[in-house]
Image (tube, grey):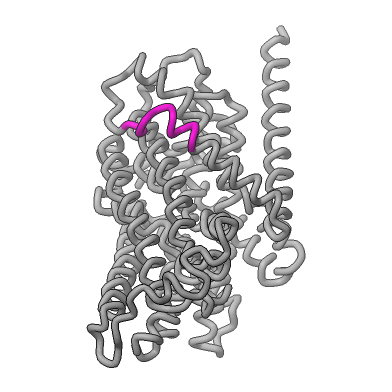
């Protein structure tokens, strides 16, 4: 087991990760590219358009820029110091054991709770196709399939994610191509739409800048999931190079897919026709005359949910394994198979995830809603600790091992501080928004509980060291 590294100790470690190096560059690149292309984009973007109108383009630019800055910071640290715990390890090195413990367990909790949402959502779609198979049976099938894949070898996870992400990326590229043809009137029975929908019905900002800000709040959490690529990089042949290439290739393309999709949607259709909970992608495909648009998008969302389930199971198992390595989780989770897979960590994560699924199926409006609220703002807390860690570690890396700074944060430290300010702004928005406020308060309570445990552990360890 690795001892915790104090802030005064050298950053470079000589220990080799016991996990298998089974992920290839193509796996990491596609994981970074497809990791955030999910149901939040395909379905959830309708809510953002409904409140911001065409200004949703600006909302996505702001939220996407924040996500890009966080990924650049995380990429810099992970390229210099790759580890299976990624930002949890960085937080421990930068701020102390309490920070590594807190961010690691919060992120694990976030993944296993969201895993339940994804499994249930995929089961609902599958149940619509085959009503004779109950929803709980579909959940069981998904859990068994992806648990087996994650237990066998890390390359299985990589292959699943590669093809899942390829399908999602291909779907968006095809969608953008068809939409552009329709915008310019190049499809049968279509006419060029011009700027009518962008400037009509209240103009580009029909609800003003307040609508744009509300749009940011509606879409920013859709960018969660990019962090898993830095966790996965530790299981590649050349972690430092792999994470650098994956981050560079992912951030710009993802912003292009998100902002590009919103641009063609609000150009092609009146923003006032969008409804929360209804996919704007289906509306566009129906508009251009694609037969069975709803079912096509159901298939894409289904794949997106399974992809996220697979990635969250992988990320949660590696995070809890890293916590066990550093003495912040039970040592029994350190057991690694002959193929380099932390099987007990996988089973521990899927067990809690399956318990969350049961809570979601039985009590979606009571117990599970409180769990979901408790992780509603956790992503922002995790991002905040990533930024704080990068502020502290960048100077130390420059001093102790500058040759490892192969991927640098832009305009350091100014953009790091700007990102922190942006996260603070989103938290303030959540506090003032009636619907988002419960999520923030419950997430703050969950974070406070984990912080309390971390402080009590520090106090106990200090007392133990002082006792002869």
Name the residue furthest top: 468
Compared with 244, 308 (above or below) is below
Compared with 295, 224 (above or below) is above
State yes or no: residue 289 in magenta: no
Name the residue furthest right: 366
Residue in the image at 39% along x and 32% along y:
77
**Residue 227 located left or right of residue 101:** left
Please name whichever residue, 441 or 244, is drawn nearer the observer in this view of the structure.
441
* Region in magenta: 408-418
Compared with 354, 69 (above or below) is above
Please name whichever residue, 374 or 281, is drawn nearer the observer in this view of the structure.
281
Which of the 4 quarters of the picture holds residue 259?
bottom left
| Residue 322 visible to the viewer | no
Residue 47 at what x, y percent from top left? 56, 68
Which of the 4 quarters of the picture holds residue 232?
top left
Residue 421 at what x, y percent from top left? 55, 37
Which of the 4 quarters of the picture holds residue 186?
bottom left
Residue in the image at 27% along x and 49% along y:
249
Residue 267 at what x, y percent from top left? 38, 73
Compared with 453, 176 (above or below) is below
State yes or no: residue 411 in magenta: yes
**Residue 444 located left or right of residue 342:** right
Please name whichever residue, 224 or 362, is drawn nearer the observer in this view of the structure.
224
Residue in the image at 55% along x and 24% along y:
95
Please name whichever residue, 346 or 389, is drawn nearer the observer in this view of the structure.
389
């Amino acid at each position: 087991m690795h001892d915790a590294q104090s802030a005064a100790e050298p950053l470079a470690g000589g220990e080799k990760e016991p996990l298998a190096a089974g992920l290839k560059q193509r796996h990491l690149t596609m994981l970074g590219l497809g990791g955030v292309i999910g149901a939040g984009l395909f379905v959830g973007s309708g809510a953002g358009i409904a409140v911001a109108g065409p200004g949703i383009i600006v909302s996505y630019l702001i939220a996407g820029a924040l996500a890009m800055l966080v990924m650049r910071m995380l990429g810099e640290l992970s390229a210099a110091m790759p580890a299976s715990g990624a930002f949890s390890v960085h937080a421990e090195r930068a701020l102390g054991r309490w920070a590594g413990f807190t961010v690691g367990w919060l992120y694990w909790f976030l993944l296993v709770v969201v895993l339940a949402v994804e499994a249930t959502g995929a089961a609902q779609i599958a149940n619509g196709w085959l009503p004779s198979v109950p929803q709980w049976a579909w959940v069981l099938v998904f859990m068994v399939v992806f648990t087996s894949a994650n237990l066998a070898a890390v390359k299985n996870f990589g292959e699943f994610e590669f093809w899942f992400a390829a399908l999602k990326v291909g779907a968006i590229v095809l969608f953008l191509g068809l939409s552009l043809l329709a915008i310019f009137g190049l499809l049968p029975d279509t006419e060029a739409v011009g700027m009518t929908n962008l400037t009509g019905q209240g103009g580009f900002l029909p609800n003003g800048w307040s609508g744009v800000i509300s749009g940011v709040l509606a879409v920013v959490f859709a960018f969660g999931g990019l962090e898993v690529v830095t966790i996965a990089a530790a299981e590649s042949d050349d972690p430092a190079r792999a994470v650098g290439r994956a981050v560079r290739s992912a951030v710009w393309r993802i912003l292009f897919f998100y902002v590009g999709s919103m641009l063609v949607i609000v150009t092609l259709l009146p923003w006032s026709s969008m409804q929360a909970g209804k996919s704007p992608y289906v509306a566009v495909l129906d508009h251009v005359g694609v037969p069975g648009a709803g079912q096509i998008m159901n298939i894409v969302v289904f794949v997106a949910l399974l992809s996220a389930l697979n990635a969250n199971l992988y990320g949660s198992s590696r995070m809890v394994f890293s916590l066990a390595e550093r003495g912040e989780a039970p040592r029994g989770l350190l057991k690694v198979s002959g193929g380099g897979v932390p099987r007990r960590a996988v089973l521990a994560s899927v067990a809690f995830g399956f318990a969350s699924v049961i809570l979601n199926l039985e009590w979606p409006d009571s117990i599970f809603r409180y769990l979901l609220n408790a992780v509603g703002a956790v992503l922002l807390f995790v991002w905040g600790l990533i930024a704080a860690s990068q502020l502290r570690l960048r100077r130390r890396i420059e001093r102790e091992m500058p040759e490892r700074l192969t991927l640098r944060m832009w305009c350091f430290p100014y953009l790091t501080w700007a990102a922190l300010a942006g996260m603070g702004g989103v938290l303030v928005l959540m506090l003032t928004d009636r619907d988002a406020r419960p999520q923030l308060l419950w997430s703050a309570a969950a974070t406070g509980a984990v912080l309390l445990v971390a402080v009590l552990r520090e106090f106990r360890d200090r007392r133990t060291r002082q006792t002869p």
